[in-house]
Image (cartoon, rainbow, N blue to C red):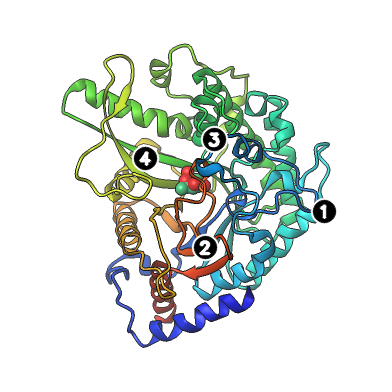
Amino acid sequence: MANDASAVFDTLSPAVSNGSLADPFTPPADSSLWRKNFLLGAATASYQIEGAVNEDGRLPSIWDTFSATPGKVLAGDTGAVACDHYHRWEADVEMLASLGLEGYRLSIAWPRVMGAAGLPNRKGLDFYKRLLSRLKEKGITTSVTLYHWDLPQHLEDRGGWLNRDTAYRFADYADLMSRELAGTVDAWATLNEPWCSAYLGYGNGHHAPGLANDRFATQAMHHLLLAHGLAIPVLRANDPASQKGIVANIGRGTPNSDSAADQRAAHLFEVQHNAWILDPLLKGAYPQDLFELWPGTEPLVLDGDMQTISAPLDFLGINYYFRTNVASDGAHGFRDVPLEGVERTQMGWEVYPDGLRDLLTGFKRTYHNLPPIYITENGMASDDKVIDGHVDDTQRISFLKRHLAAVDQAIKAGVDIRGYFLWSLMDNFEWAFGYERRFGVVHIDYSTQKRTVKRSAELVAKFLKERKARV
Ligand code: FCB
């Protein structure tokens, strides 16, 4: 594997240095992206890349169970092998470093590092210790997400996020991780996308654990946010020098017409996708409109919970992918009205960079205490093929350029955005869509595990090299 990686970079460098690589990516001279302290990195998540699900004492997660259930994941794919990153991590770090990426956002698999009785699993912990130390040796900024959806199955067996106790178990896990890994983590994010865990996991059942009930979704969300709030002071106590935050996915909803009903539908869409998470975190209260959308689903909230949840954050991680055009459903809610003739990705998601800018500037107006922001995920899937040793992912290059321009516009409009992690470093297990959807800037051949740097990654590397060389 080490040989594979160096071969890739032997071919990359001449093309970059002799200028023969066409460059539809490099941001314009006045872009804030040229600022050296604007962190540019890539992200991954444990279950999507690691594989080795039965090794070194790792316990099953809800995604092992869910993906092994017929009909839940496209083509019956599972994360059992994925990108085999658990064994190939050294070459993968080399690859990251050779691309000049300055930051790496990864997640820890909770079932790999903690046994059912709450005791540490040393072998699993050592994996992350080695990985994080190597990243630091390479000068890469480390952003670690504690929970990117792989809940230990034994906790799901006791109710998962419907059980308040899971929030306390999460705080224990955060305690163990921050005691063990302090000094190697620049930024801790408690949760990745609680909306997906709560709504897709417990509200519509598209994700693990596959339950479908709106009341479950609001209660799961409350326990997820509580878990976050309980973990923040623990992380602060154990690892004071690092940044602490959370990662939320945000969605742009636009009205299908000027009618008051459609405007209201778009508002409710954004309440359901954004305010449901951001209001409790930044205002200490759930948005009441949410319960207009889902009457009778108020979660059980105990005294003090909202204060715990709204503890100050050092940063807010934002994941953005697309917008949804909506109309009133004629009752309390909204329905999707897909626009025709717009650019879409392999996921069918509309390419809509303005949505990122508009949401960020909107949040700045809505939340007076909006913390500094990192874009912790943005990217797209395409049906990439290796041809003559290269992957020409032209749509992705243009996608990244346009979204980075949207970030620049938001910065110029006064939003404090400190960095951007593209999703993803490499093609990986895309949850319910398995391996068919390729989000990486590095291509994975799943039959050989060969990594091939796509054109997009070469151009990002070229830009970073130029930025670094500037005085
Ligand atoms: C986000 C997830 C990430 C990846 C992208 C495409 O919702 O956080 O793991 O699947 O979508």
Question: Viewer-nearest of labels 2 and 4?
Answer: 2
How far is mark 2 from mark 4, CA to CA? 37 Å
**Of marks 1 and 3, which one's residue comes earlier in the chain?**
3
Question: Viewer-nearest of labels 4 and 3?
Answer: 3
Whether residue 302 can be seen here: yes
Q: Residues within 10 Å of mark 3 (few under 14, many from 20)?
A: many
How far is mark 3 from mark 2, CA to CA? 23 Å
- For mark 4, what is the residue? 363
Amino acid tagged 4 = Phe
- For mark 1, what is the residue? 122
Q: Quadrant of the N terminus?
A: bottom right
Picture residue at 27% right of the left edge, 68% below the top: 30
Question: Viewer-nearest of labels 1 and 4?
Answer: 1
Residues tagged 4 and 3 counted as in contact (Cβ below 8 A): no
Q: Position of residue 286 (x, y in %)?
A: 47, 24
| Nearest to the observer: residue 397 or residue 421 | 397
How far is mark 4 from mark 3, CA to CA? 35 Å
- For mark 3, what is the residue? 72
Relative to 413, is 303 on the left or the right?
right
**Of marks 2 and 1, which one's residue comes earlier in the chain?**
1
Q: Residues within 10 Å of mark 1 (few under 14, many from 20)?
A: some
Amino acid tagged 3 = Lys
